[in-house]
Amino acid sequence: MSELLKSIDARTKLAGSNKLEMLLFSLGKNELTGREETFGINVFKVREVMRIPEITRAPDMPPSVEGMVSLRGVLVPVVDLIKYVGIQNSKPPQIMIVTEYNGHTQGFLVEGVDTILRIDWSAMKVPPEMLTTQLGGLITAVTELKDGRIVMMMDVEKILAETSSYADDASIALLKPIPIPDRTIFFTDDSVVARKQIEKTLNALGISFIFSTNGKEAWEELQKIANRASATGQKVTDFIQLILTDIEMPEMDGYVLTRHVKSDPRFAGIPVLMHSSLSSDANQHLGRSVGVDGYVPKFEPQKLAETLARLLMSTRQPGT
């Protein structure tokens, strides 16, 4: 199993090439449907894969939270994904995938892991509405393998928001409007939970916004804005003053989107802020290498507010 994740740090070179690597895993055969679905998680977020260690049960936890485990002296919450997804499977989970999001470590219990799949983000498609509805918005992207299997990428941010205080709204309530009127930002994120958090934060700050749900859609919309500005003799900065982007998105990731924006002179003077749960130094370095003007971890509204205020103030025109 250690071979499965060997050289994981070296895989950072894939970022910025619109490619990703997913660790494929199974939650077992659903006894209600007779099907065994294949799920995926970005390798960047996986720290290790192991047999399930001893779990310490804790009272008053959500049904799918099994308890805590001690990993090298650190207590880590453990979520049973089989229970969370609602799969009827009499076999107990066998494997724990240890992940890191925004510096927070957690373990996910699954029946088994398969392999690591390298794929272009353009092959990851927005899930059909029927699938989204069936799984309660849990899937952010899907792709079909050569053997006909459908791989579904989980919205881990949604899982964490519903099983912990990961997306706590209390800090948003403390935010105050920024003293810069008539500011509009464009943001893109494929996670429903993340989009709601961003919207709440921007509303609290008094900032108008336009949004999209993936990188390709974002670039198409940004080009429309730029074309409209050119057609009316205006600048893009008359329409939007900042772009906020996630990293992991189907069809086009945030690195490639940023590169497109920074290479198009029509967007000169518009800062790009990267907003992601990929919290490693390597990811931040990659963001800087494609020209991002700042990096803020997800679900930290105070940091997001401070960074937005600073960047918007720096682009403020005299008299506005």
Image (tube, rainbow, N blue to C red):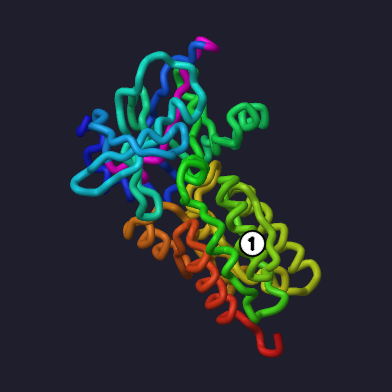
Against 270, is 73 above or below?
A: above
Measured from the top left, where is residue 82 in percent x and y? 44, 25
Write the residue at 37% across / 33% down. 66
Instruction: Please say whether residue 44 is one of the residues in the magenta stretch.
Output: yes
Between 17 and 86, the residue placed more toward the observer is 86
- Residue 209 shown left or right of residue 21 in the figure: right
Report the amino acid beneath label 1: Phe
Q: How many marks?
A: 1
Residue 291 in view in this figure: no
The image position of residue 197, as x and y in percent, is 58, 55
* Residue 118 placement: quadrant: top left
Q: Secondary structure at mark 1?
A: strand
Task: Decide if residue 42 is in sight here.
Answer: yes
The residue at 44%/62% (across/down) is 290
Find residue 33 and report its horizontal and vertical position in percent. 54, 12
For the N terminus, the image quarter is top left
Mark 1 Cα-neighbour bin, 10 Å: few <14, some 14–19, many ≥20: many
**In the displayed structure, does residue 116 sit left or right of residue 36?**
left
| Label 1 sits on residue | 186
Magenta part of the chain = 32-47
